[in-house]
Amino acid sequence: MIFSSRLIEDAVAEFAKLPGIGKKSALRMVLHLLKQEVADVDAFTNAIATMKHSITFCSQCHNVSDTSVCAICVNTQRNKNQICVVENIRDVIAIETTQQYNGVYHVLGGILSPLDGIGPHQINIESLVLRIKNNSEIQEIIMALNPTLEGDTTVYYISKQINHLPIKITTIARGISFGGELEYADEMTLARSISKRLPIDNYVNMGGQ
């Protein structure tokens, strides 16, 4: 692309760094912003800058948060007896969208992948185990990890760390096909997978099938 303005060229280059955004889409976004009021553009850029500089992670569940403890963890209407274990923040958003789960979460920040050098100490497994051991009110751990080989390995590893504790360990039902990802599942399928969750023993005995 040839631009008459270096400022527009630089802005397009920055937008094009976003995932799924090509040069043409970036140009449309830049030209759209160019037509907006200065106050609106300032609000847009300030919101992004403030998010980047101020956002933090929940000290309890590792979800993104504006404060040291996220809005889900401090919500007194949530069922603190259930912890749903997910891989990342996008999975929290996907499950929340279904409106079928009212417990709290634990975000691992990844899954076990020895080939990529990701072991138990590279993700938030230890804090999960400590959280369970230190809270006698927890009754159920729901494994809501992507149905992949790495996801299944992570489920198996975590279950071995906590299966001696007096809690129920379940996993979401296989409404989601093997190799799929939670964030791309439709709301109805994901909601059904949560509501029809299975005991972890059944899941392990089936070899993740």
Image (tube, rainbow, N blue to C red):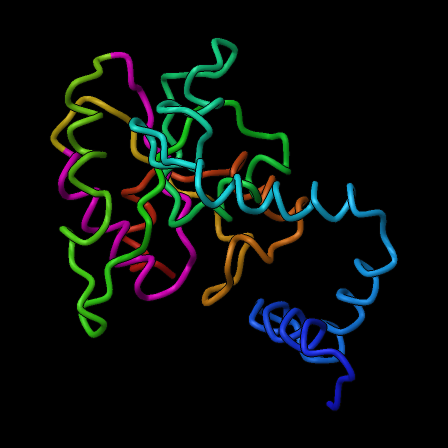
Which residue is more in the foreground, 54 or 112? 54
The correct choice, above or below, for 30 with respect to 83 in the image is below
In the rendered image, the residue lying farthest to the bottom is: 2
Q: In which quarter of the image is residue 18?
A: bottom right
- Residue 165 placement, left or right of 110: left
Q: In which quarter of the image is residue 35?
A: bottom right
- Residue 107 placement, left or right of 179: left
Q: From the top left corner, tell me how far across and down residue 126 is, in percent.
A: 15, 39
Which residue is more in the foreground, 59 or 174? 59
Q: Which residues are the magenta region?
A: 137-163
Q: How many labels does the image show?
A: 0
- Residue 186 placement, left or right of 102: right
The correct choice, above or below, for 88 with respect to 92 in the image is below
Residue occupying image coordinates x 15% and y 23%: 133
In the rendered image, the residue lying farthest to the top is: 76
Position of the N terminus, as image quadrant, is: bottom right
Position of the C terminus, as image quadrant, is: bottom left
Q: From the top left corner, tell me how far across and down residue 17 is, in percent.
A: 56, 71
Residue 140 is covered by the magenta coloring: yes
Q: From the top left corner, tell me how far across and down residue 64 is, in percent.
A: 43, 37
Residue occupying image coordinates x 16% and y 59%: 119
Which residue is more in the foreground, 102 or 36? 36
- Residue 26 placement, left or right of 206: right
In the rendered image, the residue lying farthest to the right is: 35
Residue occupying image coordinates x 49% and y 14%: 75
Residue occupying image coordinates x 70% and y 41%: 43
Q: From the top left corner, tell me how far across and down residue 69 is, in percent.
A: 37, 22
The correct choice, above or below, for 83 with respect to 125 in the image is above
